[in-house]
Amino acid sequence: MILTFKKAEEYTKSALKLFEDNLVINWHDHSDQRWFATEDELKIFDESYYNRLVETVEKFHFDKTIISFLSMDDKCSVEKMKLANNINAEAIRRNPDKFLGLCFVNPGYQKEALYEIDRCREMGFIGLKLYHQYKLNDPVLFPIIERCIELDMPILMHAGRLTFDQYEPQPKLSQGEYFADIAKRYPESNLIMAHITGGGDWHWQLKAIEKYDNIVLDMAGSVIDEPVIEECVKRIGAERVLFGTDFSASASVGKIIGADISEEDKKTILCGKRYKRFLGIKE
Amino acid sequence: MIIDTCTYVGHWPYRKLPCETLNEITEKAEKRGTTHIVCTNLNAIFYIDTMEGNREFYEEFKNYDGKVKVLPVAVINPNYIEWERDIIECKEMGFVGIALYPLYHSYSLKDDIAKKAYKMAGDLGLFVKLDAGFENIRQRNPLDVFKDLDSGEIVELLKSDYRVTTIISSTFLNPSGTMGLTDDVRVEALKRDNVFFNMIYADSYLGGSFEAHLKDFTPDHLVYGTQAPFRYMEPQLIKMFTIEALTDDMRDKIFYKNLIDIIN
């Protein structure tokens, strides 16, 4: 058989060496995807999913992947958030060299959420993951943000600005300006605006956070719009961009490889330079 | 040989694209090992008479002498005066396919005019390209259309003439999802050997949709496409060269063999 795609294959394999040869910290993926599971279902670890996660991480040479598991239930119970964090802990326990954890809480249960953050911290989780149960600038979150500041934990917040949400309504989705509110109120907080390419108006999101140095973003997500990575680097600098996948490994790896930015900026994004310290990695 | 079934030149009115000319897009394609591009002029979609855009594109590809072969696709609006004459003129200018944009030209693929255009393309040996949409629906400019091509309309068009080679592009192929094509499009397509889908929005590994498409659509109905310059080309290459389930024979089919007739 005559291979008719040799040049493309060589180009791709050569480009992928960026991941093989450099420190890669993936700041956004998940230890499970049963978002609407019942409490009983959450008592069982999903082996099949976990194996696919490990396969993905190994295939693309991610040195560290920061994982979380959450419930998409708007009224996620205290028990569910504990069970979700237990699943996350189990994934980390199985492969502590590759995985680090973020703690998920429903801020509506404020006292229990604070307890859960402390419990997860004791298990070694390095940060907090919030979903769309509340907008980031809702006062219910203030004590939680304050606890994260106290514990020096970054907050990865589900985010987006949907121009059309008929298919996936998320009325409490956090837009960029809500991050800006919190960045102003808590300049010492470490905020990660999730998946700039997770669907939604990324121009809006980027513009909203541009001025606030304590907000970084992760570039996870299935949207592969060119030139989103170039725009991120141009507007906020590579140090404020973290690599992430969020179920979209080929999309996310491809965006970095394809971006018309310097090799140095790509390495800065891949190693998550600004946030390395949360993993105990020194400069 | 690699055919990219989805590229564009021209201006997109809703956001700035990284390149707009044939020289720019072919340079990117060549660097990444692509040998042929199926290409449409975006301007033609938005001009009141699409032919102004098609003629503009003709001037561009007539003067192009790059290494990457260009397979020009004309934008035809069968809801506009003298569209039959437009198709003939495009064929004479060297266009090898036509693209229909019912959402931008106020008709339905179920309408007789759409079926007539589809049939006429078949009669003239032109393929038909159907772009389900351009931008992710959650982030469209409010001035853009807020739906993608309807699955039922596509099925009806496909049923109207079995001879026409058809490329369905730029959509989620996720029958269980809320966005994208429903499964009846796949079922209809698999009855024929000349309907193809590109997998621009499918992810691999943890997402797993690319791997699922390989099974559900079979490599005989999948083609390569990037949707450049809207999208980076690299995610598509990564899928093609990292998925272990893909054999070289499958890659050949997806990269070019399924579409060998349109090159010839």
Image (cartoon, rainbow, N blue to C red):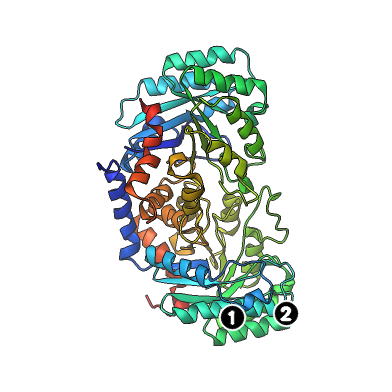
Q: Is residue B48 visible?
A: no
Q: Residue furthest front?
A: B191
Q: Position of residue B107 (x, y in %)?
A: 67, 26
Viewer-side residue, B134 vs B164: B164
Viewer-side residue, B68 vs A268: B68
Residue at mark 1: chain: A
Dot 2 or dot 1, earlier in sequence: 1
Depth-wise, is mark 2 or mark 1 nearer the camera? 1
Image mark for residue A110: 2
Residue at mark 2: chain: A
Number of marks in the image? Answer: 2
Secondary structure category for the residue under label 2:
helix
Disc 1 packing (10 Å; few <14; some 14–19; many ≥20): some
C-alpha distance separating marks 2 and 1: 19 Å
Q: Which residue is mark 1?
A: A86
Q: Position of residue B232 (x, y in %)?
A: 44, 46
The residue depicted at 54 percent of the width and 18 percent of the height is: B120
Occupied quadrant, residue B256: top left
Viewer-side residue, B157 vs A108: B157
Disc 2 packing (10 Å; few <14; some 14–19; many ≥20): some
Viewer-side residue, B59 vs B169: B169
* The N terminus of chain A sits in image quarter: top left
Image mark for residue A23: none
**Amino acid type indicated by mark 1:** Asn
Image height check: is A215 above or below A1?
below
* The C terminus of chain A sits in image quarter: bottom left
**Amino acid type indicated by mark 2:** Gln
Image height check: is A55 above or below A81?
above
Left or right, B84 with reference to A253: right
